[in-house]
Amino acid sequence: MLYCSTRNKEKKVSLAEAISLGLADDGGLFLPEYMPKIDISSLDQNMSYANFAAVILKDYFAGDILEPSLGRICHNSFNFPCPLTKLDDKTQILELYHGPTLSFKDFGAQFLAETMNELAKLDEGKKITVMVATSGDTGSAVANAFYGKSNVNIVVLFPKGQISKRQEQQIATYDDNVIALAVDGTFDNCQSIVKEAFGNEWWHDTAHISSANSINLGRLLPQMTYYAYTSYHQYLQTKKAVNLIIPTGNLGNATAAYFAKSMGFPIGQIVLATNANRVIPDFVKSGVFTPKASIITVANAMDVGNPSNFERLHELYPDFADFVANVSAHSINDEQIKETIKSTYEKHKVIICPHTATAVYVREHCLNIEDKSKSWIVISTAHPSKFETVIEPILGIELSIPNKLNEVLHRPNLAIDSSASLDAVTKIVKHNFFK
Ligand SMILES: *Cc1c(COP(=O)(O)O)cnc(C)c1O
């Protein structure tokens, strides 16, 4: 399997290259040259999640230097469950938050870390430096996933004082090959520093910079596996395709669902839920894609004004009529999110995070009568305890903290202060990793 850019079908690269590069050199996103098909009757229903994942990702790894490592990568990455729980008779919740940092981003980050570590090993032990800017969940998932991977150093930049205490503890308490820099600036400043580093000679030639953001294929491919696994096992029970509602920001999670559907997994309708950042719902209405500055909401991991995976999803359905036949999207405001957190707790005694609440709101209020009567799976993207500052005042209760989170809350914070310039960041990185 080879991969081409969304902007140029002619130039093809290997999977290993696509993952190391992150972004194509013409600025496009990598897509497989064709979508592999699966015959679900050939699958063995007793396979473990990791084995199942390796089977469905096989075609994407075919012929690559990474192919012999796929089984090991899956085994090391997927060692936590993704249970379906019942909300009401026609609604289930797919809990994607049982990984080490309690968000669905663990699936992608763990897989990418294993893959990059393998790649560095295969490349005569060349060390890679991954730099990532974060406003929350990405940084924690990536820091945890790469921690202790001996062939990769990792630098996480976050805006000082602008992420929650819990988020900071999840990012800044690692030693060894992970450093967290508290940057005196905004998230946008952090992101500009990363972009600048990609064009910098030292970062390119000596640090071997790579990225771990959500456009990397190494995060997208593993996210297909939970849609494949869940839809397959549901189909065995019901003989029906599953309908999905997905909380959406950069469109990484949702695009993975469309990939799984294109492969032939029994997935019916896919409906996207955004917060007040409504670029996708507006596109579905108007056919015009207009990136905007992001708006701050209570579902902050979805505060995205220019969804980076749009180009990939658009390439799956280039014709607008086809796009709207496959993609519907609704924008949910903060009041509606809060109201849903409250009503879901009151009606079902289930506590959901603000991101998940956008999808539950869509389930209850945005479907037409015919669709509403069908069965749906709502995707739950994070454990509620990560967003206690939003949820506790609404519910008037104190949320219990899972052990995985509690553990990091008591470790020393090792964040290093940095001013918002590439020079300052480079100095710190040289001092820590290139002595
Ligand atoms: C990242 C994130 C999202 C958005 O996912 P995308 O792949 O960017 O669309 C939703 N919820 C949570 C909790 C997240 O961390």
Image: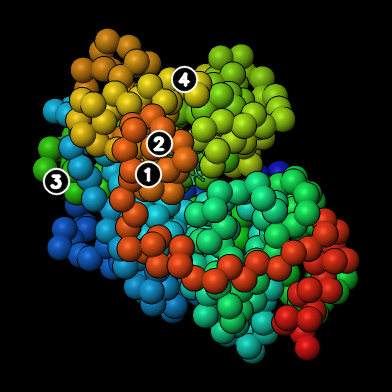
Relative side of 349 to 80, left or right? left
Which residue position holds label 3? Answer: 236
Q: N-terminal of the two: label 1 or label 2?
A: 1
Determine whether 127 is above or below 365 in the image: below
Disc 2 and disc 3 in contact, CB within 8 angstroms: no
Q: Secondary structure at mark 3?
A: helix
Residue at 24% x, 50% y is 83
The quadrant in which the C terminus is found is bottom right
Of labels 1 and 2, the one closer to you: 2
Query: Gap in Å between the C-alphas at discs 1 and 4?
Result: 17 Å
What mark, if any, has residue 320 been given in the picture?
A: none
Q: Which residue is mark 1?
A: 384
Q: CB at mark 3 closer than 8 A to ligand 1?
A: no
State how far apart marks 1 and 3 are (Cα): 30 Å
Q: Where is 327 relative to 136, above or below?
A: above
Q: In this view, which residue lies farthest toward the top?
A: 369
Task: Give me the disc on residue 391.
Answer: 2
Quarter holding residue 346: top left
Instruction: State the image coordinates of residue 340 (x, y, percent, origin top left).
Output: 35, 24
Q: Nearer the viewer, residue 401 or 85?
A: 401
Asked if residue 28 lies left or right of residue 368, the reply is right
Tag 2's secondary structure? helix
**Earlier residue among tags 4 and 3:** 3
Q: Amino acid at mark 3?
A: Leu
| Disc nearest the viewer among 2 and 3 | 2
Mark 1 / mark 3, whichever is N-terminal: 3
Callout 1: few (<14), some (14-19), or many (20+) C-alpha neighbours within 10 Å? many
Residue at 52 percent of width and 33 percent of height: 298
Q: Nearer the viewer, mark 1 or mark 3?
A: 1
The CA distance from mark 4 to mark 3 is: 39 Å
